[in-house]
Structures are given as C-alpha cells and as structure tokens.
C-alpha cells in the first residue's frame, strides 16, 4: 500500500509540488493500482509498466495518476 510516511523514497520531493498528492483519492483505489502507483512514484517502473501492473490501459492509469496529482516522471 502507498504510504505517506518516508516521502524521501520517491523521485520527487512532495513539498515542492504545486498541489499536494491527493492521498484520500489514492486510498480509494484498489491495492493493485496503489501498488503500481507506489512503484511508479519510487521510479522503479515506467508509467507504461505501472499501467501493466495495475492491469489498466495506459490512458486510464495516466488519468488516475493525474487525478491523484502525481507528477510525471520523464
């Protein structure tokens, strides 16, 4: 599950985001999607691979990422 604690594990600094991540929304998602987001936020997998892990089409996973206000990793 995605954890708010220990934010240093992510490739971005949450304090520098224009809008904070919507953790309430993230916690409404299935464990599979939360785990895929966690891997993506750590920089362990690409967004395409995270979508595969979540078993969602790329566009749907990216829409969820955007709603959650998770930044894009290039």
Image (cartoon, rainbow, N blue to C red):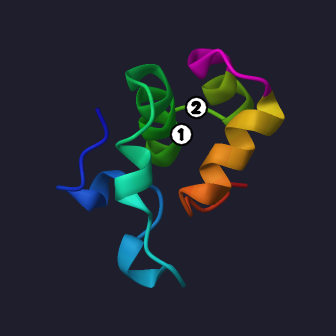
Q: Measure the alpha-carbon separation of dots 2 and 1.
A: 5 Å
Answer whether residue 56 is magenta in the image: yes
8 with respect to 31 (left or right): left
Q: Position of residue 56 (x, y in %)?
A: 70, 21
> At 39% from the left edge and 40% from the top edge, which residue is drawn?
28
Above/below status of 32 relative to 13: above
The image quarter in which residue 34 lies: top left
Which part of the image, by quadrant, shows the N terminus? Answer: top left
Figure quadrant of residue 54: top right
State the SS at label 2. Answer: loop
Name which residue lies at 79% across and 24% down.
57
The numbered mark at residue 40 is 1
List x then y, in percent, for residue 15: 36, 80
| On screen, residue 20 above or below 59 | below
Q: Nearer the viewer, residue 16 or 55?
A: 55
* Residue 7 locus on image (x, y percent): 27, 59
Which residue is at 31% across, 40% downward? 2
- Between disc 2 and disc 1, whose residue precedes? 1
CB under 8 Å between discs 2 and 1: yes
Mark 1, secondary structure of its residue: helix
| Residue interval drawn in magenta | 52-57
Mark 1 packing: few (<14 Cα in 10 Å), some, or many (20+)?
Answer: many
Residue for badge 2? 45
């Amino acid at each position: 599950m995605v954890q708010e604690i220990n934010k240093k594990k992510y490739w971005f600094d949450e304090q520098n985001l224009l809008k904070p991540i919507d953790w309430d929304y993230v916690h409404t998602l299935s464990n599979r999607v939360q785990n895929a987001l966690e891997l993506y936020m750590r920089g362990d997998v690409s967004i395409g691979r995270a979508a595969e892990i979540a078993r969602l089409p790329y566009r749907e996973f990216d829409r969820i990422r955007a709603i959650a206000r998770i930044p894009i990793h290039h």
